[in-house]
Image (spheres, coloured by chain):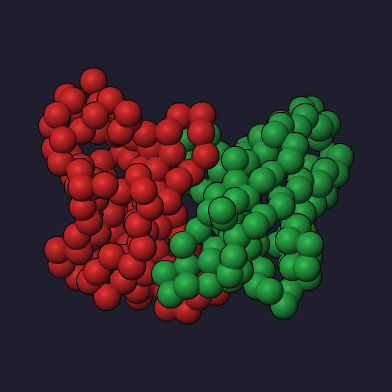
Chain colours: A red, B green
Amino acid sequence: EPEVTQTPSHQVTQMGQEVILRCVPISNHLYFYWYRQILGQKVEFLVSFYNNEISEKSEIFDDQFSVERPDGSNFTLKIRSTKLEDSAMYFCASRRDGTYNEQFFGPGTRLTVL
Amino acid sequence: KNQVEQSPQSLIILEGKNCTLQCNYTVSPFSNLRWYKQDTGRGPVSLTIMTFSENTKSNGRYTATLDADTKQSSLHITASQLSDSASYICVVSRNTNAGKSTFGDGTTLTVKP
C-alpha cells in the first residue's frame, strides 16, 4: 500500500542553522501539506501546496519557512534560521484531487533545536 | 474563528468496554470531518471521513456520527482493545480548494486490562 515517507526521522540542529525536512508524497496525489506538533500540544497546520504554489498558509508559516517541490517526487520544508521554539514533530501529508479525499500523513520528522 | 473542541480530554476504560468521544466545531464553510488515531510519536492515521450529507460512517469497531446542523460529531469505539490506547483527533476541513484543516486537541484514551 502506498504511503507518505519522511526523512530524516530525527534531526538535531543548533539554533540559527538552516534545516530541510524532506517528504515523498504518494505518487498520484496532487495536494501537499506540512503540519507541526509541539510536544504535548495539538497538530497545527503550516502550509498547503498545489500546482507548484502555496495554496494556504497559517500565521506560523512566516518568512523563515519555505516549501518546494524540486522534482516530481519530493516535497520539502525549509526553516532558514531555526529557533528553540521550532522544536517539534513535523508531519507531511498528501491528498488526491478532490476536496473530500482524505489526507494521508507521513511518520513525521522530530526536529530538536539546541 | 474556526475551532474544533473535543471532550473529554482523557478517558480511561477497561478492555472490552465501549466509549464515545465528542467533537464540536465552528469551522466554516464546512467540507468534511475526519477522525484520526495517533499513537505516541507517530503520524495520525485516518479512521473515518464524513461529508456534509453523511450522518454516520463505520470502520470496524469505530463508528462516527455527524450532525451538521448542530456542528457536532462523535466517535464510538466498541469492544475496546488494549491497542486502542492512543490519542483520537477530530479534524475539520474548510470547503476551500486546499481544504485547510483545523485539528482538535484530541482525546487521550487509555484501555486497561
**Toward which corner of the image does residue A28 lie, by quadrant?**
bottom left
Q: Is residue B83 visible?
A: no
Residue in the foreground of this view, choosing between B22 and A64: A64
Determine the image quadrant of residue A18.
top left
Residue drawn 51% across and 29% down?
A40
Judge from the rendering whether residue B79 lies leftward or rightward of residue B42; answer left or right: right
Residue B72 lies, in percent from the top left, at 75, 57
Which residue sits at x=20%, y=33%? A82
**Residue lying at 28% horizontally and 25% vertically, measured from the top left:** A84
Asked whether, in this view, residue B98 is left or right of residue B84, the answer is: left
Q: Is residue A58 above or below residue B18?
A: below
Horizontal side of B94 relative to B61 (left or right) equals left
Q: Nearer the viewer, residue B109 or B105?
A: B105
Does the rendering let one see residue A87? yes
Q: Nearer the viewer, residue A51 or B19?
A: A51
- x, y percentage for residue A53? 24, 69
Of A21 and B96, nearer the camera is B96
**From the image, which quarter does the N terminus of chain A lie in?**
bottom left
Farthest residue to the right: give it: B17
* Relative image position of residue A7 (x, y in whole percent): 26, 45
Which corner quadrant holds the C terminus of chain A?
Answer: top left
Percent x, y for residue B30? 61, 69
Give residue A26's quadrant in the image: bottom left
The correct choice, above or below, for A1 with respect to A78 in the image is below
* Residue under the point 57% across and 55% down: B2
Q: For this view, does B19 lie left or right of residue A44? A: right
